[in-house]
Image (tube, rainbow, N blue to C red):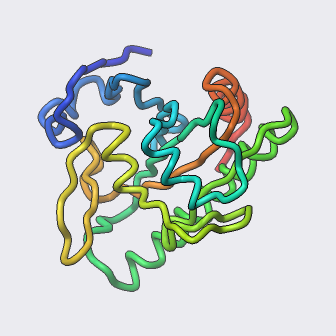
Amino acid sequence: HEESIITRKDGWTSLLAHAKLLGRILLMTANDHLRQFKSDFEYSIHECPRGMRRELERVFPGVNLDNSFVVVPTFQQAACSLQEWGDLESAEKDRLLERFLRWAGEVRRMLIQREYWCDVTDPCTGKAFFGVAGPSCYSDVDGIERLLKTGTEMAGACRIMRHPRWGFAVYPATLFTTAPHNEVREVIEALRQSWTS
């Protein structure tokens, strides 16, 4: 597989002009790059920055974030733009949330078998999904902006992201784990081989 690797610090929107190159774009960052899980599902693996760890302690209370702590933003291509809010967009968000939770549940199961903690935040509420929810919320858009150095755009009162190929037809969601970076990658790659959804 050929890959087009574009190293840019000014974010997603700067890549729009390059989105047609070879059909696959990997955005290089200081920590990692976007990887393709399926043609309509991408992810990136990052060591959690220190400042973000302090914030996440209030999202995931009781979890030791001092050692390895990895953040895995994911991006799914939606069947329609998610810039507006209506019945069609709501149904599509529900479909993509269910798909993300099936994927995350499998990744979590495999990491727990290796004796690591793993959880996700609900993209709607920003609260821990599988474990005990703390007093704070996690914003997927804010996290992606910090980890991937992306820009965001306003849609009404909400900040949203634009994908370099999918535009506003993108559904972001995030997984968190204490597993080391390389083990997270191994688990996701093993799951990719058997994933049918």
Query: Residue 71, position in %: x, y?
Result: 54, 40
| Quarter occupied by residue 116 | top right
Q: Nearer the viewer, residue 25 or 149?
A: 149
- Image point (40%, 59%), residue name: 78
Query: Residue 12, position in %: x, y?
Result: 23, 40
Query: Residue 67, position in %: x, y?
Result: 65, 31
Q: How many marks?
A: 0
- Image point (43%, 24%), residue name: 32
| 6 left or right of 40 in image | left
Q: Nearer the viewer, residue 97 or 134?
A: 134
Quarter of the image for the N terminus: give it. Answer: top left
Q: Nearer the viewer, residue 125 or 35?
A: 125
Q: Indicate whether 164 appears above or below 93.
A: above
Q: Indicate whether 33 appears above or below 85.
A: above
Q: Nearer the viewer, residue 169 or 121?
A: 121
| Quarter occupied by residue 37 | top right
